[in-house]
Image: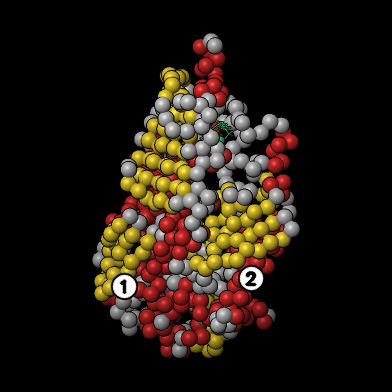
């Protein structure tokens, strides 16, 4: 083999690696999938420094002979398909034969492997795509792959990696998904030798969710019995009515043992819950769909988890019918369907701030927690001269103004007032904080937990006091005064999800405060019919003390006005 050919192969692999391994978690994904394809009963994953320093995946699967092991590092070497027509019936995770050579081309890579039939194993070591050594290695049957110094051979890619904690969070999320998807396999995940979770194979699903996802989540779901249609089978766990999330983080969908993203499935699940959780929120679910592999298309982008179904409508209907059957049956058990929606907002925690906001008294400024200490001091008592003429449905009110006629959008006005009062507290650098007599406790997914750690100073400056008391367990000792304790957990979850989604916006304090205040008011929109006339007038007064009375924080108008001249023209 000439030098030039080796270089070409390495470069080709590094290019392929750009697609296959974007971050440490993607390496773990490929290795895990190989272990599962090799019919392992036990898989152990170890990593350190977010996987950047080292990742090890060890299994007790089929293993490889020395020659197979060498071959497995060639591009397009796969034992899993032979013909293009096999692509229609893929039952294994891998089939491209790209992962191992790609990973080995951008890291230091050591594979030890032994099939049960061979007396001993082989060790192959590769650095940046070049063979370092191949030798015999005594070991139990199975395969152990160690990847260290990821991206050192391609430094340009190193700088795209996020903090150790964020990368670690991605790894933890990934291994959890695979562990949930494979009940027959025992999983152990460790970071720097510390156990993150361990789940023995063959435990009932609810137990696995408790081990892998945590006790809090396990308490929020109930068992969904199995449903079947010709060629399809569905089972899993469903979130209790009223339990919801701001992202799809706990909407876990598994198709034929593969954790997947499926718009169709997410949509069907969210649809089924539509009166049970607030709009724009996602239910909690662990749903397992099994179907003929010929009906599923997994041959999409290597790094993505998306699947497509040959008949999307069929899958969607099956899901909706099954989930609704479960939810209805539950309703028959004493929770009448009609009352569920009414129950929801209170228990869902999701309405976040509105409790504070919707107490009319807070608008008037009587609640000391509502008005920022600095605001009323220099707030001029504006004499607006607006006179309330009438309510217009629930959302609006009509006023006579000194120059004409105005229609106020009560919800939008509310949001503007609340937004500026929260912002004023932030910028005053003295957030009004309410200590909790009994600290709230919250268990966070690794990703939100990493975000929380990164943003602790910001949150402290906004009036939050968080304390970590175990891996991913946090105590909330104090809240900003504008946040109702009952709404706090939901608010914090939403906030962290939003922070993870819009990393950039939360880097600079001014942007961060703005984003935080916007999140705080986003669900503050409310019906106006619970405000008395006097409170409505106070809202108008407060609105015109804000910097931008004309719009809500998201730019919708708070009122429209017709001057007398406008009106004259219209009659003219
Ligand atoms: P693919 O999974 O697409 O076939 P990979 O590059 O991931 O491609 O792996 C190449 C081949 O190496 C696999 O087809 C399989 O035969 C073998 N292999 C990889 N990992 C393992 C493992 N943990 N145990 C047994 N065989 C493995
Ligand atoms: Mg593979």
On the image, the x and y values in percent for residue 107 come to 43, 29
Mark 2 nearby-residue class (10 Å; few <14, some 14–19, many ≥20): some
Image point (57%, 44%), residue name: 304
Q: Nearer the viewer, residue 343 or 177?
A: 177
Looking at the rendering, the quadrant in which ligand 1 lies is top right
From what the image shows, is residue 236 above or below residue 86? below
Binning the other alpha carbons within 10 Å of mark 1 as few (below 14), some (14 to 19) or many (20 upward) gives: many
Asked if the beta carbon under badge 1 is closer than 8 A to the nearest atom of ligand 2, the reply is no
Pointer 2 and pointer 1: residues touching (CB < 8 Å)?
no
Which label number is shown at residue 400? Answer: none
Of the two numbered discs 2 and 1 on the same chain, state the one appearing first in sequence: 2
408 lies above or below 466: below
Position of residue 507 in the picture relative to residue 341 (left or right): left
Q: Position of residue 173 (x, y in %)?
A: 45, 50
Q: Secondary structure at mark 2?
A: helix
Q: Is residue 570 above or below residue 453?
A: below
Q: Locate the C terminus by quadrant.
A: bottom right
Q: How is the image coloured?
A: secondary structure
Q: Residue at x 34, y 76 (%)?
A: 370
Q: Nearer the viewer, residue 115 or 215?
A: 115
Observer able to see residue 103: no
Q: Which mark is residue 324?
A: 2
The quarter of the rendered structure image containing the N terminus is top right
Q: Position of residue 3 (x, y in %)?
A: 51, 11
Q: Describe the element under mark 1 as helix, strand or loop.
A: loop
Q: What residue do we see at 69% from left, 47% from top?
A: 293
| Residue 245 placement (x, y as % from top left) | 49, 64
- Residue 83 shows in this picture: yes
Q: Furthest residue to the top?
A: 2
In the picture of the structure, the residue carrying the numbered disc 1 is 481
Q: Where, by quadrant of the figure, is residue 352 drawn?
A: bottom left
Q: Is residue 239 left or right of residue 95?
A: left
């Amino acid at each position: 083999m000439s030098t030039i050919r080796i270089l070409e192969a390495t470069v080709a692999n590094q290019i392929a690696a750009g697609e296959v391994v974007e971050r440490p978690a993607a390496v773990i994904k490929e290795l895990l999938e190989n272990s599962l394809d090799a019919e392992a009963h036990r898989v152990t994953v170890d990593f350190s420094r977010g996987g950047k320093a080292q990742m090890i995946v060890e299994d007790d699967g089929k293993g490889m002979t020395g020659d197979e092991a060498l071959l497995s590092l060639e591009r397009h070497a796969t034992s899993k398909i032979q013909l293009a027509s096999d692509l229609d019936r893929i039952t294994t995770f891998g089939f491209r034969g790209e992962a191992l050579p790609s990973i080995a081309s951008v890291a230091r890579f050591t594979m030890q492997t032994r099939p049960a039939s061979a007396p001993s194993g082989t060790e192959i070591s590769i650095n940046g795509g070049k063979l370092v050594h191949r030798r015999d290695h005594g070991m139990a049957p199975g395969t152990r792959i160690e990847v260290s110094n990821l991206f050192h051979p391609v430094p340009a890619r190193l700088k795209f990696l996020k903090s150790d904690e964020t990368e670690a969070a991605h790894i933890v999320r990934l291994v959890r998904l695979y562990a949930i998807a494979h009940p027959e396999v025992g999983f152990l995940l460790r970071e720097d030798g510390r156990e993150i979770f361990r789940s023995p194979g063959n435990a009932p699903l609810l137990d696995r969710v408790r081990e892998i996802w945590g006790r809090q989540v396990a308490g929020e779901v109930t068992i969904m019995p199995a449903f079947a249609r010709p060629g399809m089978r569905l089972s899993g766990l469903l979130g209790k009515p009223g339990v919801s999330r701001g992202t799809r983080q706990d909407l876990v969908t598994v198709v034929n043992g593969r954790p997947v993203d499926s718009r169709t499935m997410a949509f069907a699940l969210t649809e089924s819950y539509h009166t049970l959780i607030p709009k724009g929120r996602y239910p909690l679910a662990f749903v397992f769909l099994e179907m003929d592999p010929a009906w599923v298309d997994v041959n999409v982008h290597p790094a993505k988890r998306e699947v497509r179904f040959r008949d999307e409508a069929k899958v969607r209907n099956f899901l909706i019918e099954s989930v609704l059957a479960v939810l209805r049956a539950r309703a028959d058990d004493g929770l009448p369907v009609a009352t569920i929606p009414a129950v929801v907002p209170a228990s869902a925690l999701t309405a976040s701030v509105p409790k504070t906001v919707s107490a009319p008294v807070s608008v008037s400024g009587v609640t000391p927690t509502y008005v920022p200490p600095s605001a009323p001091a220099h707030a001029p008592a504006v004499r607006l001269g607006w006179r309330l003429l009438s309510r217009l449905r629930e959302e609006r009110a009509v006023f006579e103004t000194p120059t004409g006629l105005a229609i106020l959008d009560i919800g939008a006005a509310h949001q503007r007032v609340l937004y500026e009062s929260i912002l004023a507290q932030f910028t005053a650098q003295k957030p009004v904080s309410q200590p909790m007599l009994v600290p709230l406790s919250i268990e966070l997914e690794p990703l939100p937990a990493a975000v929380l750690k990164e943003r602790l100073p910001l949150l402290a400056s906004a009036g939050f006091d968080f304390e970590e008391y175990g891996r991913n367990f946090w105590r909330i000792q104090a809240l900003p005064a504008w946040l109702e304790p009952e709404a706090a957990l939901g608010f914090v979850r939403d906030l962290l999800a939003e922070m993870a989604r819009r990393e950039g916006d939360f880097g600079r304090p001014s942007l961060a405060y703005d984003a935080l205040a916007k999140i705080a008011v986003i669900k503050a929109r409310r019906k106006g019919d619970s405000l008395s006339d006097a409170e409505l007038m106070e809202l108008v007064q407060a609105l015109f003390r804000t910097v931008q009375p004309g719009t809500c924080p998201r730019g919708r108008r708070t009122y429209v006005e017709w001057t007398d001249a406008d009106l004259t023209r219209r009659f003219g």
